[in-house]
């Protein structure tokens, strides 16, 4: 067995239908008397009862890729009301803003996820200024508590449930061949993929199991380093403002195919979790069966961006099972652009 190091994540997790009723007591447990309650504009209404129950202050301006200008605006509201913690309700965008504030203030965070993004389980923060997305890892960024309530996913549009679920699976796929992986992370990753692949096609009936899978996949993301897949999505999101979950969905089968030969144990586990013959083909088929986008073209990426994206992804070295070859990455992006099923 490969030598490894393992550290458990310090985040408290509360899971179950109806658990939203415990949001105020969880906030109190963290010592919050006046939390900043963060949502996107779209989910402002969902945050109102938490604002009321916690004596909180609403900030409904969270946006994708955590723009620093929005964080500065939220920081001003937090300071002017003397807030002593944050409660982020929503997908990765709301969570990201809570984390950006925690990084600057070290105030406690309670996260109430309503998508499968998994950001709530990590110490990772990706912030955007202009078109550059910069990622940092810091213990202050790790949320103190997470409350998962599958009932909150009832409003999730099916198309977003599909891509958000594929985004979660991507964390587990890369966890299986991570340079700093370990046996517990691999167990969580395989079970996370299995749970999501089984639950996503069941729609609302599968929300319990899908959210459980997303928690596992988020824990994987928070435990080990990510590789080419996340790098590519990061480049496409930051430099070309591509939508996060959709981009992960399109890239994942192709990044898995790229790394397949160099990580036979990982692809065997992925295929087993999917109940499919091949990992990359199985991921493509799952996305297709969910009606998710399969091409970068339909996401609006100009074909001219592929060269630049391949160049950025191959430029700075980072651990990946297969060597980073610019031409092969360019081919991967071309396949993803046209939505070709990986062989
Ligand atoms: P999102 O949070 O932007 O959500 C997309 C839209 O769906 C938003 O308008 C949101 O309000 C809405 N929405 C979310 N849940 C809903 C629900 N249950 N019902 C109705 N509407 C709902 O998208 P996302 O994919 O969850 O998160 C993407 C962001 O998270 C990106 O910025 C990405 O970089 C970040 N992220 C970070 C990490 C990390 O570890 N740092 C991990 C994953 C994602």
Image (cartoon, grey):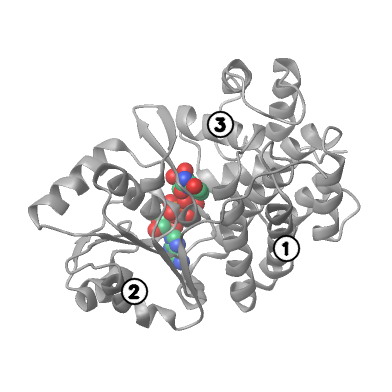
**Structural distance between the alpha carbons of marks 3 and 2:** 42 Å
On screen, residue 239 above or below 327: below
**Which residue occupies the foreground of this view, 18 or 224?**
224
In this rendering, position of residue 36 left or right of residue 43: left
In this rendering, position of residue 242 left or right of residue 56: right
Residue designated by label 1: 191
Element marked by disc 1: helix
Categorize mark 3 by other alpha carbons within 10 Å: few (<14), some (14-19), many (20+): some
Residue designated by label 2: 26
**Residue 148: percent from left, percent from top:** 48, 71
On screen, residue 155 above or below 235: below
**Residue 244: percent from left, percent from top:** 52, 44
Categorize mark 2 by other alpha carbons within 10 Å: few (<14), some (14-19), many (20+): many
The circle drawn on residue 242 is none
Occupied quadrant, residue 309:
top right
Q: Please name the residue shown 22% across and 64% down the image.
A: 35
**Residue 291: percent from left, percent from top:** 68, 57
**Structural distance between the alpha carbons of marks 2 and 1:** 28 Å
Q: Please name the residue shown 61% across and 52% down the image.
A: 220
In this rendering, position of residue 176 left or right of residue 218: right
Occupied quadrant, residue 86:
bottom left
Q: Please name the residue shown 33% across and 56% down the image.
A: 40
- Mark 3–mark 1 CB contact (< 8 Å): no
On screen, residue 120 above or below 146: above
Residue that sits furthest to the right in the current view: 277
Q: Please name the residue shown 42% across and 51% down the image.
A: 142
Residue designated by label 3: 301
Element marked by disc 2: helix
């Amino acid at each position: 067995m490969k030598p490894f190091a393992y550290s458990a994540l310090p985040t408290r997790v509360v899971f179950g239908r109806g658990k939203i009723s415990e949001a105020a007591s969880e906030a109190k447990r963290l010592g919050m008397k006046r939390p900043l309650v963060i949502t996107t504009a779209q989910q402002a209404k969902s945050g109102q009862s938490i604002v009321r129950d916690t004596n909180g202050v609403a900030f409904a301006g969270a946006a994708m890729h955590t723009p620093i200008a929005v964080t500065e605006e939220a920081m001003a509201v937090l300071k002017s009301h003397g807030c002593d913690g944050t409660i982020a309700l929503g997908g990765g965008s709301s969570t990201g803003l809570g984390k950006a504030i925690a990084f600057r203030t070290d105030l406690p965070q309670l996260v109430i996820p309503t998508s499968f993004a998994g950001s709530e389980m990590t110490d990772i923060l990706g912030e955007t200024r202009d078109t550059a997305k910069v990622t940092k890892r810091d213990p202050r960024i790790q949320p103190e508590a997470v409350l998962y309530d599958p009932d909150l996913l009832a409003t999730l549009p099916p198309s977003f449930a599909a891509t958000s679920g594929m985004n979660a699976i991507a964390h587990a796929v890369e966890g299986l061949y991570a340079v700093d992986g370990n046996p517990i992370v691999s167990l969580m990753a395989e079970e996370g993929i299995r749970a999501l692949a089984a639950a996503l096609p069941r729609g609302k009936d599968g929300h319990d199991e899908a959210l459980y899978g997303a928690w596992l996949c988020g824990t994987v993301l928070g435990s080990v380093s990510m590789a080419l897949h996340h790098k590519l999505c990061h480049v496409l999101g930051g430099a070309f403002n591509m939508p996060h979950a959709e981009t992960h969905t399109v890239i994942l089968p192709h990044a898995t195919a790229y790394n397949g030969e160099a990580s036979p144990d990982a692809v065997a586990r992925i295929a087993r979790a999917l109940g499919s013959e091949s990992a990359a083909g199985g991921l493509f088929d799952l996305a297709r069966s969910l009606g998710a986008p399969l091409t970068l073209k339909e996401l609006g990426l100009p074909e001219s961006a592929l060269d630049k994206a391949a160049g950025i992804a191959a430029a700075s070295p980072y651990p990946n099972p297969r060597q980073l070859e610019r031409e092969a990455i360019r081919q991967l992006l071309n396949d993803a652009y046209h939505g070709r099923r990986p062989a």
